[in-house]
Image (cartoon, coloured by chain):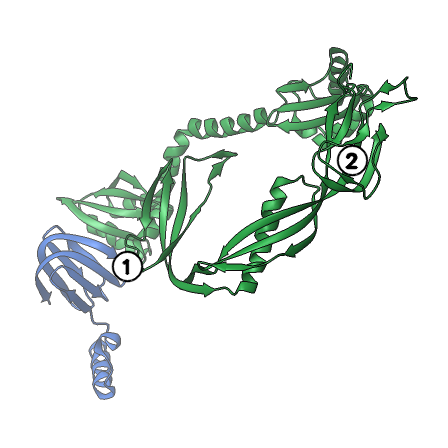
Chain colours: A blue, B green
């Protein structure tokens, strides 16, 4: 049932040419240089250290690796991370 | 995202979260819709973050739910600054108390000055004044204004012609003018009035003495006008002759007026230099290089800066450099005569009293010589001609 709904959503998005992040609750990641990263549609922090930030997403996780991380601001849906960003990875 | 400086207005705290899983505390915070920012990693299982002061009360519940311990490590923002100030409220109260006492003390009467009164009047005035309430330590708010005091006091003190009341700061000044009997003018030495110039008598007003001349009579210099001896001949009394005698005189003035005069007219081009004057020094503060005009007319303006009636040792001023043009003016002979007349009048008036009046003028003959007009003018002047002359005893 859940799979079917997902397929429906994807199909509608494709057909109607809608932005996928809005329709499908996908994360939107904006990177400014290598020192600011702006993440929308996250679902909470799993782990946060100086060198690593792991975020929960609707599907899977987002791992950001770097150094001197500071969460400048965090809201239910969005967050701004500052630091030296070296790697961004999606983990299923 | 909100502006960070807004947090400073409302105030915020830095907290240290320690527990087995501090991230859960962060998640709960954002789920509750709390503002939380600047999250640092401070070691294993320890996070440091900022929380609004208004939302501190929720922290305890969230900490319990997420099994974390919270420690406050810093307080920031205006509420805390104000609190700090309030802790030193002695300074604030001191300042307020100082200004309050300054205000109260400067609105009290500290002195009553009485000037120009004899001891009896002074005593009376002191009593009258203290009845109104003007004494040392009284508040000025409850006292009538000086004008009213003046009218009250002048009514009470009958011995004084006038009492002036002024308030200077905390002192009341009373300036008393006492009634006193007018003294007789000192008797003048007996004397005659004689003519100071050769003249024709125009007007004769004798207060005391025996007039010796008539209207339209020609008198020579030194002629007796009013005699100081009155009474029957042989039994005369000596008085000081008094009176005003106007006589008409003639005066000839020779005035030369240059026909050509160099005049300067400003063209409108000007340059202003601003100066700061300190004592006798003037320091230019703006306008460093005035342009070089062929002819320059300079006008200087200086302002006056005063504080409480005292002139400050420094003030502002500016000088205008105005470009000027030479204008050659050839005044005609007729014009020169008019100028000469004016100059002659000026020159003449200096030699006579204020009451002198020029009744007539006649230009004899203008003569042009070396670019100059020489004019001889005949003036008729009416002025006082009386001059005192003491009666010499045994004369």
Furthest residue toward top: B119
Mark 2: few, some, or many residues within 10 Å (few <14, many ≥20)? some
Q: Which mark is residue A75?
A: 1
- Figure quadrant of residue B199: top right
Disc 1 is placed on an element classified as loop
Vertical comparison of B167 with B47: above or below = above
Does the rendering let one see residue B287? Answer: yes
Q: Are marks 1 and 2 on the same chain?
A: no
Using the image as rendered, state which of residue B73 and residue B80 is in the foreground. Answer: B80
Q: Secondary structure at mark 2?
A: strand
* Mark 1 burial class by Cα count in 10 Å: few <14, some 14-19, many 20+: many
Residue appearing at x 54%, y 25% in the figure: B101
The subunit carrying tag 1 is A
Q: Quick check: A32 above or below A6?
A: above
For the question of whether residue B267 can be seen, the reply is no
Mark number displayed over residue B244: 2
Query: Is the N terminus of chain B in the top left, top right, bottom left or bottom right quadrant?
Result: bottom left
Who is closer to the viewer here, A61 or B309? Answer: B309
Residue depth check, mark 1 versus mark 2: number of the one nearer the observer: 2
- Image spot of residue B89 (x, y percent): 43, 29
Kindly indicate the quadrant of the structure image that contains residue A53.
bottom left
The chain ID associated with circle 2 is B
For the C terminus of chain B, the image quarter is top right
What percent of the width, then of the height, locates residue B95? 46, 29
């Amino acid at each position: 049932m859940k799979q079917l709904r997902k397929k429906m959503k994807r199909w509608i998005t494709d057909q109607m040419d809608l932005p996928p992040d809005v329709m499908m609750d996908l994360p939107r990641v904006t990177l400014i240089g290598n020192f600011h990263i702006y993440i929308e549609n996250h679902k909470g922090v799993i782990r946060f250290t100086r060198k690593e930030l792991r975020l929960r997403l609707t599907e899977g996780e987002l791992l950001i690796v770097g150094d001197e991380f500071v969460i400048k601001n965090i809201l239910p849906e969005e967050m701004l991370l500052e630091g030296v960003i070296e790697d961004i990875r999606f983990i299923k | 995202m909100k502006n960070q400086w807004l947090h400073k207005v409302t105030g915020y705290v830095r907290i240290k979260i320690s527990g087995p899983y501090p991230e859960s505390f962060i998640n709960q915070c954002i789920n509750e819709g709390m503002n939380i920012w600047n999250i640092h990693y401070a070691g294993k299982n320890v996070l440091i973050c900022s929380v609004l002061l208004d939302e501190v009360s929720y922290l305890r519940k969230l900490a319990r739910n997420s099994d974390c311990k919270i420690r406050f490590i810093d307080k920031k923002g205006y509420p805390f600054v104000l609190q700090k100030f309030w802790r030193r409220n002695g300074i604030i109260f001191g300042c307020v108390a100082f200004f309050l006492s300054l205000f109260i003390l400067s609105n009290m009467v500290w002195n009553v000055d009485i000037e120009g009164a004899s001891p009896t009047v002074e005593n009376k005035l002191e009593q009258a004044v203290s009845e109104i309430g003007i004494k040392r330590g009284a508040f000025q708010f409850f006292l009538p204004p000086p004008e009213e005091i003046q009218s009250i006091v002048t009514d009470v003190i009958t011995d004084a012609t006038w009492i002036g009341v002024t308030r200077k700061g905390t002192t009341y000044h009373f300036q008393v003018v006492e009634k006193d009997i007018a003294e007789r003018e000192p008797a003048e030495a007996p004397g005659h009035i004689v003519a100071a110039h050769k003249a024709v008598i125009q007007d004769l007003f004798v207060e005391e003495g025996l007039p010796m001349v008539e209207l339209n009579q020609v008198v020579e210099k030194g002629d007796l006008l009013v005699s100081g001896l009155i009474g029957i001949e042989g039994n005369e009394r000596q008085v000081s002759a008094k009176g005003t005698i106007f006589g008409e005189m003639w005066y000839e003035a020779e005035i030369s007026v240059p026909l050509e005069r160099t005049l300067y007219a400003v063209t409108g081009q000007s340059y202003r230099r601003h100066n700061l004057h300190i004592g006798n020094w003037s320091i230019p503060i703006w306008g460093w290089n005035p342009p070089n005009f062929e002819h320059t007319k300079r006008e200087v303006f200086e302002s006056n800066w005063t504080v409480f009636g005292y002139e400050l040792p420094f003030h502002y001023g500016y000088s205008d450099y105005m470009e000027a043009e030479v204008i050659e003016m050839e005044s005609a002979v007729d014009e020169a005569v008019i100028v000469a007349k004016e100059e002659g009048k000026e020159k003449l008036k200096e030699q006579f009293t204020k009451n002198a009046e020029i009744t007539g003028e006649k230009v004899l003959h203008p003569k042009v010589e070396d670019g100059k007009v020489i004019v001889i003018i005949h003036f008729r002047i009416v002025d006082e001609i009386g001059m005192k002359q003491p009666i010499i005893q045994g004369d």
